[in-house]
Amino acid sequence: MTEEEFDDFYSTSFGRLTSQLYAMIGNRDEAQECVQEAFAKAWSHRRKLQRTEHPEAWVRTTAYRLAVSRWRRTKLSGRVHDRSVAVPVTTAGPNENHVALVEALRQLPEAQRRALVLHHMCDLPVEEVARETGAPAGTVKARLSRGRTALHDLLNPDHDLTEGVTGV
């Protein structure tokens, strides 16, 4: 992959990958940092990346693993990550619906959250989600079904389940 090809790949994928990772982990700054670091790793592995069928999936998986590793390090150290010296980001924030969705996703089990983001936000078919997560396709389908039901309940708390049912 040439430098120009990599720059194009970065330009077209960075925002999308950051949004996807943000939906998975619920922290926009952390998502941006992890995606940036994943692209740095991708640059050093660009020959391997060029041979892979889905380079964006490679970067997304790498960024997700980096986020999990950071979370574990922070959790194990018992310290809160100090962001007081971080340079403020000047990008536009997400809209209200996106924030509500991310808040609801944060309340789901990690496996359901990741399956939902990969399938619905990344537009990956069930088989690709299974490959990326290392779970059987049937398990991914179950996670998607349970996750959608839970998300519906979280995003529509006033929804009356007896609505439209006669004799109630």
Image: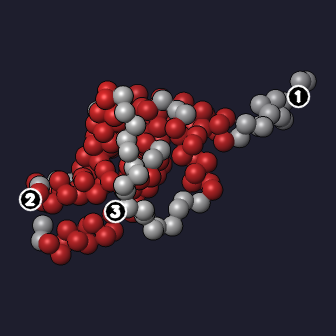
- Marked residue nearer the N-terminal end (2 or 1): 2
Q: Is residue 94 visible?
A: yes
| 42 displayed left or right of 67 | left
State the mark number for residue 166: 1
The kind of residue on which mark 1 rests is Thr
| Inter-mark Cα distance, 2 to 1 | 63 Å
Q: Residue 113: x percent and y percent?
A: 47, 37
User: Quadrant of the image for the C terminus?
Assistant: top right
The residue tagged 2 is 47
Residue shown at the point (32%, 27%) measured from the top left: 76
Amino acid, disc 2: Arg
Q: Is residue 103 left or right of residue 48?
A: right
Q: Residues within 10 Å of mark 1 (few under 14, many from 20)?
A: few
Quarter of the rendering occupied by the N terminus: bottom left
Comes first in the chain, label 3 or label 2 = 3
Kindly identify which numbered label has been placed on residue 14: 3
Q: Residue at x 33, y 63 (%)?
A: 13
* Residue 128 found in image quarter: top left
Q: Assess disc 3: are there few (<14), some (14-19) or many (≥20) residues with their C-alpha within 10 Å of its C-alpha.
A: some
* Residue in view at x 59 percent, y 60 percent: 95
Q: At x 63% / y 56%, what residue is drawn?
A: 96
Which element carries disc 3, helix, strand or loop?
helix
Q: Which amino acid type is marked by label 3?
A: Phe
| Disc 3 to disc 1, C-alpha distance | 50 Å
* Percent of width and height locating residue 81: 37, 41
Tell me whether the residue at label 3 lies in contact with that at label 1, contact meaning CB atoms closer than 8 angstroms.
Answer: no
Residue lying farthest to the right in this orientation: 167
Q: Nearer the viewer, residue 110 or 57?
A: 110
- From what the image shows, is residue 96 above or below residue 156? below
